[in-house]
Image (cartoon, rainbow, N blue to C red):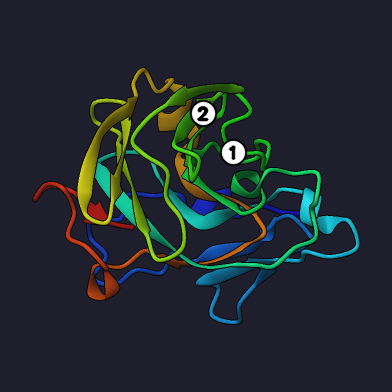
Amino acid sequence: RCLKVDRCESLASRSTSMCTLDYWDSDLDLEVSDDSLQASCMHSLGMQYLWKGCRSTHGVKGGKYMFEVKVLENLKVQMPETKPQNQNICRVGVSLPLSSLMLGDTPESWGWGGTGKKSHNGEFTTYGKPFGVGDVVGCVVDMDDGVVSFTLNGQFQGIAFTGIPDSAWEAGLFCHILLKNVRVQVNFSAASMWFKPPGQAIKFF
């Protein structure tokens, strides 16, 4: 799959958002809607055990930006040996282009999941609180200070990650979702935001 990484640019001059989920930068068992703003998991014949990731079409190299993800539905699955809280999970964050789609499992990605854990480079730490169906997660990228933060239903959860590497300024950071047996909707535009950003300087993608 060919990533259109050349479209990672400063968005300060844009009046409308062109950012969507990138079907061409997603796992094959993730179903992306025609408008590229919803995603759902194939969840039968063993695929209910697999994580499905997807990045956005655009990223940022500077400034303060955010996007939102709303968990719409937990898909019904047959996983008798798996604890209920681990059957339907949404993880939200950012990653470098051309990196693994397993958000939070590598040094090039930073995520927060519905189990109330943040993750980076395969290390999971308690952060915020668990979230699920009906909740809206906001991911805030502050390229100026090199930090990533999150909101839950409009409430700021605090700084999750610091020390974003210099490579992020060169390649850009892209919005990223990682799903297991859930259906979600994403928002990259201030015109359709569910909640206001946690600061006047923060813009939507």
Using the numbered discs, state the Cα–Cα distance from disc 1 to disc 2 in whole angstroms.
8 Å
**Is residue 109 shown left or right of residue 112?**
right
Viewer-proximal residue among 2 and 24: 24
* Residue annotated with mark 2: 119
**Compared with residue 12, is residue 163 higher up or lower down, i.e. above or below?**
above
Mark 1 or mark 2: whose residue is earlier in sequence: 1
Viewer-proximal residue among 48 and 204: 48
Please, what secondary structure does the residue beneath circle 1 have? loop
Q: Residues within 10 Å of mark 2 (few under 14, many from 20)?
A: many
Amino acid under disc 1: Leu
Please, what secondary structure does the residue beneath circle 2 have? strand
Instruction: Report the residue at 28% width, 74% height from top.
Output: 192
**Is residue 192 shown left or right of residue 86?**
left
Q: Please report contact status of discs 1 and 2: CB closer than 8 Å, yes or no.
A: yes
Amino acid under disc 2: Ser
Q: Which corner quadrant holds the C terminus?
A: bottom left
* Residue annotated with mark 1: 103
Q: Say the numbered circle drawn on residue 163.
A: none
Q: Nearer the viewer, mark 1 or mark 2?
A: 2
Q: Which corner quadrant holds the N terminus?
A: bottom right
Measured from the top left, where is residue 37 in percent x and y?
50, 72
Measured from the top left, where is residue 60 in percent x and y?
38, 45
Viewer-proximal residue among 119 and 5: 119
Measured from the top left, where is residue 203 in percent x and y?
22, 54
Please, which residue is most extreme toward the left here? 200
**Compared with residue 46, is residue 151 higher up or lower down, i.e. above or below?**
above
